[in-house]
Structures are given as structure tokens and as C-alpha cells.
Image: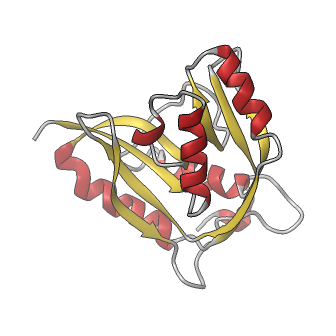
């Protein structure tokens, strides 16, 4: 069956997703229309196609153990000069994203991998383009705001045409599940209240 390139992410819903995708394209990022607007939980990862059922079962278990949480984007940030990326900041929901991505990559599951950089939830709006265009993205989206309730995450596969397509979506369990957010008053992603 061969290998596939997979990613796990939280989709930025409409109307925000399309707007940020169009803005990314307007800055001259050629990848804009091949990548749905998202917050990454698992970066592009090679996997055996035969492992897909186990991967989907793993992700389903994680989602069932969580519950919806508020997400808010506000303003811009950059990873330059370390990495040529300008992004919209996740200012609410970051702890929940960290909680989720740790479980997606957990050593007991089928998607184990080390990260190149420490995990930092964000929404990329420019990557690997001219510095002037990166500066424009940083400035023009500096007052950007969006908020929604995150109710799921999804598994994506990158096609031979470099376009990412959703394979499956995993809604959070309704009520009684382990919260995908820290207890009130704390920001640590390792609080006991987060463990199943």
C-alpha cells in the first residue's frame, strides 16, 4: 500500500478560514490554496497507509476523551529568523491545543514523532516568501481577531499535487469527557485535571 503523508489539525472555521487563506494568497504564498487554514496538532508525518485504521482509532479515542473549548486568534507573530513564518496568534485555546498535540504524538500511539521546534500553536499566514511580503503579512493582520468554539479536530492527507485533504473529522465527546482545557486559574498543560 505504501506510505502517506498525514497531518492532524484544528480547522479555522468559516468565515475566518477562507478569509485568512485569501490573505495568505494575497501575500504571494504559493502554498495558500493547498493548505486549509488551521492550527497544527501534528506536522506533516510519513505513515504506512496500512496503519490508517489504527491511526483513526487512536485519534477517535483522544477526541472522545475531550470536550469543546474556546479558541481566539488575535494579532500576529513570527518565527523569523529561526523559521520564515508569519502567523496569527492563538491567544485563547493554546493550552488545549498543547494537551491535544501531546496525546496525538504519545509514545503509546501510532503517530510518535519528535518535533523540530517546541510546540507553539499558531495559524500560518505566510511561509517562505520574500521578506517584504512577510513584513506586509505581519503588519496587515496585526489587528486581526477571530473567536469560536472548537468542537473537533481532523486528519488530513497530502496528495501528490501537494494539496491537503481531510480524511476524517473527530468531534469531542459530549459531556463527561476529560476537558481539553486546563482547570480555572492555571495554564499548565500537565495539570492532573487534564489526565483521563
Residue at x 67% of width, y 23% of height:
134
Residue at x 39% of width, y 50% of height:
109
Residue at x 60% of width, y 30% of height:
27
Q: For residue 175, what is the image quadrant?
A: bottom right
Q: In the displayed image of the protein, which residue is found farthest to the front?
A: 26
Q: In the displayed image of the protein, which residue is found farthest to the bottom?
A: 175
Q: Is residue 183 above or below residue 32?
A: below
Judge left or right: residue 81 versus residue 12: right
For residue 71, say whether it is visible.
no
Judge left or right: residue 121 versus residue 48: right
For residue 165, say whether it is visible.
yes
Q: For residue 48, what is the image quadrant?
A: top left
Query: Residue 121: x, y in percent?
Result: 65, 44
| Quadrant location of the C terminus in the rendered image | bottom right
Q: Is residue 193 above or below residue 96?
A: below
| Quadrant location of the N terminus in the rendered image | top left
Query: Residue 19: x, y in percent?
Result: 60, 52
Judge left or right: residue 119 versus residue 5: right
Residue at x 53% of width, y 71% of height:
65
Q: Is residue 4 above or below residue 72?
A: above
Query: Residue 32: x, y in percent?
Result: 48, 37
Q: For residue 46, what is the image quadrant?
A: top left
Query: Residue 140: x, y in percent?
Result: 76, 37
Q: Is residue 161 above or below residue 58?
A: above
Choose between 146 and 149: the one closer to the eye: 146
Amino acid at each position: 500500500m505504501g506510505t502517506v503523508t498525514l497531518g492532524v489539525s484544528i480547522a479555522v472555521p468559516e468565515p475566518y478560514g477562507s478569509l485568512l487563506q485569501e490573505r495568505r494568497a494575497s501575500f504571494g504564498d504559493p502554498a495558500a490554496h493547498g493548505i486549509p487554514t488551521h492550527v497544527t496538532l501534528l506536522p506533516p508525518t510519513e505513515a504506512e497507509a496500512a496503519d490508517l485504521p489504527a491511526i483513526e482509532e487512536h485519534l477517535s479515542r483522544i477526541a472522545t476523551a475531550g470536550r469543546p473549548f474556546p479558541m481566539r486568534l488575535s494579532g500576529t507573530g513570527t518565527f523569523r529568523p529561526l523559521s520564515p513564518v508569519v502567523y496569527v496568534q492563538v491567544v485563547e485555546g493554546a493550552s488545549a491545543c498543547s494537551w491535544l498535540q501531546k496525546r496525538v504524538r504519545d509514545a503509546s500511539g501510532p503517530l510518535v514523532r519528535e518535533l523540530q521546534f517546541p510546540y507553539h500553536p499558531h495559524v500560518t499566514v505566510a511561509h517562505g516568501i520574500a521578506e517584504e511580503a512577510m513584513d506586509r503579512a505581519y503588519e496587515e493582520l496585526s489587528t486581526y481577531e477571530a473567536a469560536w468554539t472548537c468542537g473537533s479536530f481532523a486528519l488530513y492527507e497530502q496528495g501528490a499535487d501537494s494539496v491537503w485533504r481531510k480524511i476524517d473529522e473527530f468531534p469531542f465527546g459530549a459531556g463527561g469527557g476529560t476537558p481539553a482545557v486546563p482547570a480555572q486559574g492555571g495554564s499548565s498543560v500537565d495539570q492532573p485535571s487534564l489526565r483521563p
